[in-house]
Amino acid sequence: MTPAKVRARFYWSMRLTLAGLAVQLVSLFGLHHPLGFMLFSGVGATLVVVGVLIFIGSLLSLVRRPESGEEGG
C-alpha cells in the first residue's frame, strides 16, 4: 500500500473516532432523554469502533511484509 493511501486511512480513522467521541459527548451532556443513550451507544460507539478498526488495519498494512509483486526494486 502506498504511503498516501496509508495516510488517508489514518486520517479517516481519526475523523471517525473524533466524530464518534463528539456524538458521545453531545448525547452524554446535551440529551436528557432515553433515546440519548441509544445515540450514545448506537451511533457514537459504532463510529469509534469503526475508526479503531480502520486504524488497526492501517497499522497492520505498515508492518506486513510486501508481496513479491509490490517490491520497488
Image (cartoon, rainbow, N blue to C red):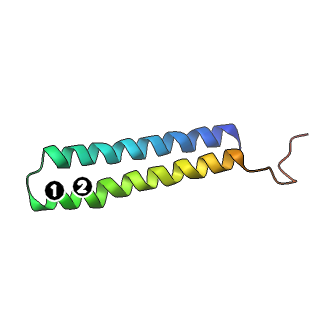
Q: Residues within 10 Å of mark 1 (few under 14, many from 20)?
A: some
Label 2–label 1 contact, CB within 8 A: yes
- Of all residues shown, which one is farthest toward the left? 32
Residue beneath the point at 27% across and 59% down: 41
- Of all residues shown, which one is farthest toward the right? 73
Task: Please tell me in which quadrant of the rendered image residue 39 appears.
Answer: bottom left
Q: Position of residue 35 (x, y in %)?
A: 14, 61
Q: Residues within 10 Å of mark 2 (few under 14, many from 20)?
A: many
* Residue type at tag 1: Gly
Q: Position of residue 50 (x, y in %)?
A: 45, 55
Residue beneath the point at 57% across and 40% down: 8
Disc sitting over residue 55 in the figure: none
Task: Please tell me in which quadrant of the rendered image residue 45 appears.
Answer: bottom left
Residue beneath the point at 53% across and 47% down: 55
Q: Secondary structure at mark 1?
A: helix
* Residue type at tag 2: Phe
Q: Secondary structure at mark 2?
A: helix
Q: CA distance from mark 2 to mark 1?
A: 6 Å
Q: Position of residue 46 (x, y in %)?
A: 36, 58
Q: Which residue is mark 1?
A: 36
Q: Is residue 8 left or right of residue 16?
A: right
Residue beneath the point at 41% across and 47% down: 16
Question: How many numbered marks, from 0 up?
Answer: 2
Q: Which residue is mark 2?
A: 40
Q: Position of residue 51 (x, y in %)?
A: 45, 50
Q: Quadrant of the C terminus?
A: top right
Whether 1 is drawn above or below 7: the answer is below
